């Protein structure tokens, strides 16, 4: 029986080597990638059955990469393997198109089972996450994340990068007042009440790149 083909994406070499050892008996490893952009290129070149990826990666984070891959390759199975157990991360991963979600601390016992499950067209979520949390995530009426305009995306990225409103205005060649308007509009749309909440929401839901 033909083994499923896999691409691994994680920015830690030791993690990738651990993946390789776990998977060699179960899958054909086509390539590895150290960031989200490299992952997109590897998938375009190799067309795997499954992508295993982390959330926190440089250049393009896992949430962004997953959304791009889901749009272009709707049949591709995406399995997140991460340290993030917060329900907000899990929800964002499945909104981005995940088929599976595993915590790194349980990786050795779960990865083969998770791959088998998602290849059968089912969802896999690590048992370490409480059942009531899983039910809430998969059966809630949570609406998709708000669509951002190109300018809102630019402003949000620069806020997360740590620039002040004045510096953002200079960088984008717009007025300070316009920057504040976009920021206020973002917070209103997302029902947030501070810059800290805005940054946390943007990072948690993969709305920006991690630089």
Image (tube, grey):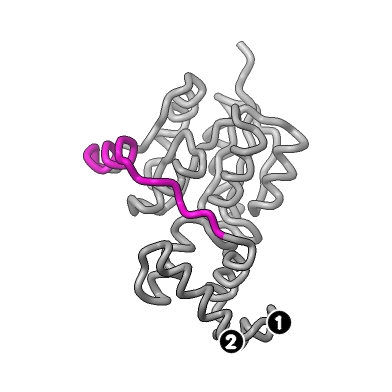
Q: Is residue 149 magenta?
A: no
Toward the left, the furthest residue is 132
Compared with 123, 35 (above or below) is below
- Residue bearing the label numbered 2: 176
Task: Say which residue appears at 55% left-offset and 85% top-offset.
Answer: 177
Q: Is residue 167 visible?
A: yes
Q: Nearer the viewer, residue 202 or 176?
A: 176
Toward the right, the furthest residue is 45
Which quarter of the picture shows residue 210? bottom right
Q: Is residue 128 visible?
A: no
Question: Looking at the rendered structure, which numbered label has been put on residue 92?
Answer: none
For the magenta stretch, what is the residue range? 130-148
Task: Say which residue appears at 27% left-offset and 41% top-offset.
Answer: 136
Question: What's the distance in space between the residues labelled 2 and 1, CA to CA?
Answer: 9 Å
Left or right for 44, reference 202: right
Q: Is residue 134 magenta?
A: yes
Task: Report if the CB atoms under discs 2 and 1 are less than 8 Å apart.
Answer: no
Which quarter of the picture shows residue 18? top right
Task: Say which residue appears at 46% left-offset and 56% top-offset.
Answer: 205
Task: Say which residue appears at 44% left-offset and 47% top-offset.
Answer: 144
Count of picture labels: 2
**In terms of secondary structure, where does tag 2 sit?**
helix
**In terms of secondary structure, where does tag 1 sit?**
loop
Left or right for 35, reference 45: left
Q: Residues within 10 Å of mark 2 (few under 14, many from 20)?
A: some
Question: Looking at the rendered structure, which numbered label has been put on residue 173?
Answer: 1
Percent x, y of residue 34: 65, 53
Percent x, y of residue 153: 59, 64
Percent x, y of residue 125: 37, 36
Compared with 200, 168 (above or below) is below
Q: Nearer the viewer, residue 13 or 83?
A: 83
Left or right for 29, reference 126: right
């Amino acid at each position: 029986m033909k083994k499923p083909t896999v691409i691994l994406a994680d920015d830690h070499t030791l993690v990738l080597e651990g993946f390789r050892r776990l998977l060699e008996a179960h899958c054909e490893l086509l390539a590895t990638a150290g960031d989200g952009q490299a992952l997109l290129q590897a998938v375009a070149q190799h067309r795997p059955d499954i992508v295993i990826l982390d959330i926190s990666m440089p250049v393009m984070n896992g949430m962004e990469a997953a959304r791009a891959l889901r749009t272009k390759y709707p049949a591709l199975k995406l399995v997140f393997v991460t340290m993030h157990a917060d329900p907000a991360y899990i929800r964002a991963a499945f909104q981005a198109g995940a088929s599976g979600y595993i915590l790194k601390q349980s990786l050795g016992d779960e990865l083969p089972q998770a791959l088998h499950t998602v290849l059968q067209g089912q969802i896999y979520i690590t048992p370490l996450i409480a059942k009531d949390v899983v039910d809430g995530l998969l059966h809630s009426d949570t609406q998709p994340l708000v669509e951002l305009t190109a300018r809102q995306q630019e402003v949000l990225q620069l806020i997360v990068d740590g620039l002040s409103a004045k510096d953002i205005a200079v960088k984008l060649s717009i007025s300070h007042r316009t920057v504040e308007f976009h920021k206020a509009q973002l917070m209103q749309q997302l029902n947030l009440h501070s810059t800290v909440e805005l940054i946390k929401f943007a990072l948690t839901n993969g709305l920006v790149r991690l630089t």
